[in-house]
Amino acid sequence: MSGKRIMDIEVLRAVAVLGVLFHHLQGSLFTDNVPLLEQIHARAQHWWGVDLFFAISGFVIARSLIPALQGCTTRQEYWAQTRNFWLRRVFRLLPSAWLWLALILLACVFLNRSGAFGSVSANLQATLAGVLQYANFRFADSFFHYEYGSSFVYWSLALEEQFYLLFPLLIVLCRKHLVWALLALVAVQIFTVRTPLLMVVRTDALALGVLLAMWSAQPGYQRWRPTFLHRPWAGVSTLIGIGLLLSFMATDRFTLSAYRIGSIAVLSAVLVWIASYNRDYLMPAGAVQRLLGWIGSRSYGIYLIHIPAYLLVRELIFRLQSTGLPSPAGHPIVTLVLAFGLIVLLSELNYRLVEMPMRNRGAALVKRLGTARPAVPSSGATSC
């Protein structure tokens, strides 16, 4: 499949990150109860955006990595391809992640008169967990037990980065049995009660995304195209309908709660499957698609930035209100405008000044290594 950007995938990234932003409004941006938010959260939860991200990541990574590794004929070629994959991931993800970990820590020390950013000790430990990629395990351990720190969203990044580290090894170990290994991984998780630990190592959506990528390389995949979604509003209605169903399943009103995460993973994979055909089934070309495409392309930065932005707005409002002067600060609408404006500004700066330059450096380094060290077949090497 082509490496060209799929607009429906960008739309799904936008939907996922907007859901996470909305989910974290209560508690991170608003500490007092906002009646409207309380009513919405009682009927719909939006944390499932993380699982949609997992399904997207599994699909996008596997559609390029599996053919590259399965095309290897020597061990040297396999390790070269794996090294290149890891280098691209490092330059794509870590600079922004580490930058915002450092900024959160600085804000905790110097911009924390309100206490919004939490304690220095908790944030130091959270920063270490984020840098060393065990944030998901710390998050599970801290759940309702102790303060995690302001970088708690890094749990999902740690899980994805663990996946990026181990997936190339899984491909070569399982070889022709990779499909069965992934199906077993999904089946076991779907029928397992999720403890806090299992919640932060949930890989069913990732595995389903990988399976979709493998299926998409088969000739018969095109026969399953959902062409009926090209009818006016059919695709958008499907996206809204599945989104509403996911939001309901994420609440306590969903009676089959033991199967909640597995069901959300399957529906997330359905959305990625629709998007994978690159026919604009979910969102037709136009102004809305361009807007969601912009959000989707910046979704990684938005995900990293939204919590520190929320906390910074809380700190700003606290300082304005502590002056005793009349101010509209603290009104929910003003608070939302400030927070979302800050997120848009910071995510755009992050995209232009950090994400794209570092991504290009990673690609240049991989290219330089490829030209500097041409693969020399070894007669004793084993097949990939």
Image: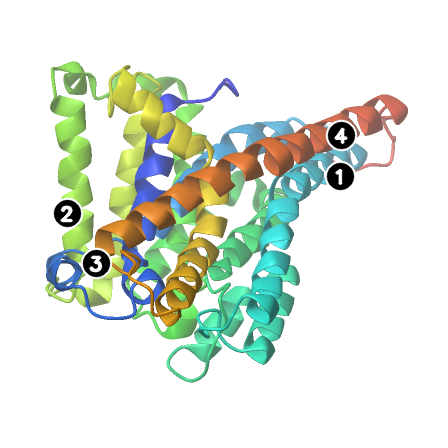
The 10 Å Cα crowd at callout 1, few under 14, some 14 to 19, many 20 or more, is some
Q: Distance between the residues labelled 3 and 4?
A: 41 Å
Label 3 residue SS? loop
Residue at image position (49%, 50%) is: 304
- 208 or 74: nearer the eye? 208
Contact flag, marks 3 and 4 (Cβ < 8 Å): no
Read off the residue under disc 2: 245
Q: Give whichever of discs 2 and 3 has the lower sequence position.
A: 2
Secondary structure of residue under mark 1: helix
Q: Mark 1 and mark 2 in contact? Answer it, CB < 8 Å.
A: no
The numbered dot on residue 79 is 1
Q: Which amino acid, by three-letter code, is at mark 1?
A: Trp
Q: Tag 2 or tag 1, which sits nearer the N-term?
A: 1
Identify which amino acid the numbered label 3 is placed on: Ala
Q: How far apart, in angstroms, are the residues tagged by discs 4 and 1?
A: 13 Å
Specify which label sits upstream in the sequence, 1 or 3: 1
Determine whether label 1 and label 3 are within 8 Å by CB: no
Q: Mark 3 points at which residue?
A: 250
From the image, state whether disc 4 or disc 1 is nearer to you. 4
Residue 315 image offset from top left, x and y in percent: 43, 64
Which is more N-terminal, label 1 or label 4?
1
Across and down, in percent, residue 275 comes to 32, 27
Question: Is residue 9 visible in this depiction of the protein?
Answer: no
Q: Which residue is drawn at 61% across and 74% down?
A: 125
Residue at mark 4:
366
